[in-house]
Amino acid sequence: MKAFGKYISKYLLSFFIVALVLLLVNVLVFTLTFGSIVFREYGSASPSKMLDTVAAELSVSGISEKTKQDLSNYQVWAMLLNEKGHCIWEVSLPEEVPTQYTVQDVAAFSKWYLQDYPVFVRNTDQGLLVLGYPKDSFTKLTGNYLPIRAIRVFALFVIAVFVLDILFLFFVYYFSKQKILKNTEPIMTAIKALSTGKPVSLSIQGELAEIADSVQLAAQVLSRQNQARANWISGVSHDIRTPLSMIMGYSGRIVSDDTTSENIRQEAEIIRAQSAKIKDLVQDLNLVSQLEYEMQPFHKEPLRLAKLLRSYAANLLNAGVNSEYSVEVEIASDAEIAVVECDARLILRAVGNLVQNSIQHNPQGCNISLSLTCSETSVFLTVADDGVGLSAEKQRELTEKPHYMESTDERLDLRHGLGLLLVRQIMAAHDGTMAIENSQKYKFMITLHFQRMKT
């Protein structure tokens, strides 16, 4: 956690530095954008400067040609009013501007506008000097003034800077996220592999090295635990075989002994049948353990499932199935030549488990269907029966609830179908899936989905 904290702190510090740099850039852009406007509008062409310049050289005859030229360059007009409000001198005075004013007129325009021209006045010895600037060049406030252009540019500036800042921060976030994902992806992949019990190998340098080492250590501990668990199951399975074989042997002898009473022979048959179930369960448990911890050797080869399915059905019928059960094989015409890469022994085990599951849960008998269909990329093997079927709650439990072998929480009641777990493990080992489906014709139906080989 300490290493992870350092890693996060590093990125938070980086983000703070980026935000500070962005703030400085905004200030710089603001200065460059508004500096020229302020310099121009508040420099030599500003109302106060122009009033000072004109008033300094103002005389009855007017002003110098240079000052007139400056006024013309800045599109500024000027006039001089005497104490009676009459214009006694003007430069570039617009036609709509009057040349005679009352005291009230002077009081009004000196604070605001004259014919929509922002005007600025200065009281001199020669009279009242009035300078008029172009319309929409300044907005006049009480005791101050602001350039209209600056106000307009300021609104655009705020919008532009806001959009650019958002885009910049988004790119910073995006590339930071990509970098974090790139750095943490090996760890996340390792954790995901760890959750499935697969071996993990990590070699990461930098701030996350400590976390990677912790994940590696956890993987080693889990691997040892899984190995010990698999070895224990294998050992127990081996130790059970001998006494189980003896029980089955002696019970078989009792069943075949004609001198034994019928009652005892029936009880011995029950012992033998239940012992056979225990033997199958032990074999399933051992195989599930080997598949789960990838200890089961595979012999995959291209195989036509249609041939395999027919062979299984023939062996099943030849072994003798009670008359209460019927077995049908349906193979679609396009599935006859469909080939998948698989371990024939494991696939036969999966199909056998599903068929025995139908037989065990339907003691009153049922019709069992084995069907094979395919598409361009997949092959579907379905085992179904029309027996008692599954309740919605039981189907949800089989679909969503993990088996006790897949859970480390011993407080949960997760002990359902080891046979179905074995089928699912076999399909996972073949990169396929097992699905419990609903059907109007059949009460219970399981479909095995294989990847079809290209021929």
Image (tube, grey):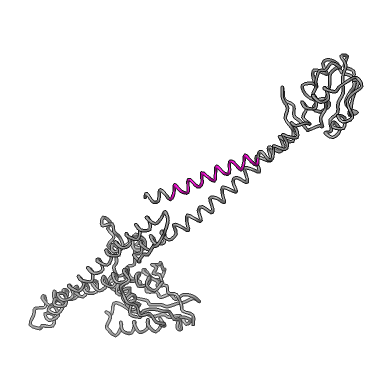
* x 29%, y 60%: residue: 414
Residue 196 position in % (x across, y down)? 36, 64
Instruction: Give left or right: position of 303 versus 325.
Output: right
For residue 9, above or below residue 67:
below
Instruction: Give left or right: position of 393 versus 120.
Output: left
* x 35%, y 62%: residue: 194
For residue 187, above or below residue 99:
below
Residue 123 position in % (x across, y down)? 81, 18
- Viewer-nearest residue: 431 or 198: 198
**Residue 43, quarter of the rendered image:** top right
- Viewer-nearest residue: 102 or 379: 102
- Viewer-nearest residue: 154 or 325: 154
- Magenta span dominant secondary structure: helix
Residue 242 position in % (x across, y down)? 16, 76
- Viewer-nearest residue: 150 or 320: 150
**Magenta residue check for 130:** no
For residue 306, above or below residue 155:
below
- Most extreme residue toward the left, as rendered? 259
**Magenta residue check for 24:** yes
**Residue 88, quarter of the rendered image:** top right
Instruction: Give left or right: position of 179 versus 282.
Output: right
* x 42%, y 72%: residue: 449
For residue 308, above or below residue 429:
below
**Residue 115, quarter of the rendered image:** top right
Q: What range is drawn magenta here?
A: 7-29
Residue 409 position in % (x across, y down)? 28, 57
* x 59%, y 41%: residue: 24
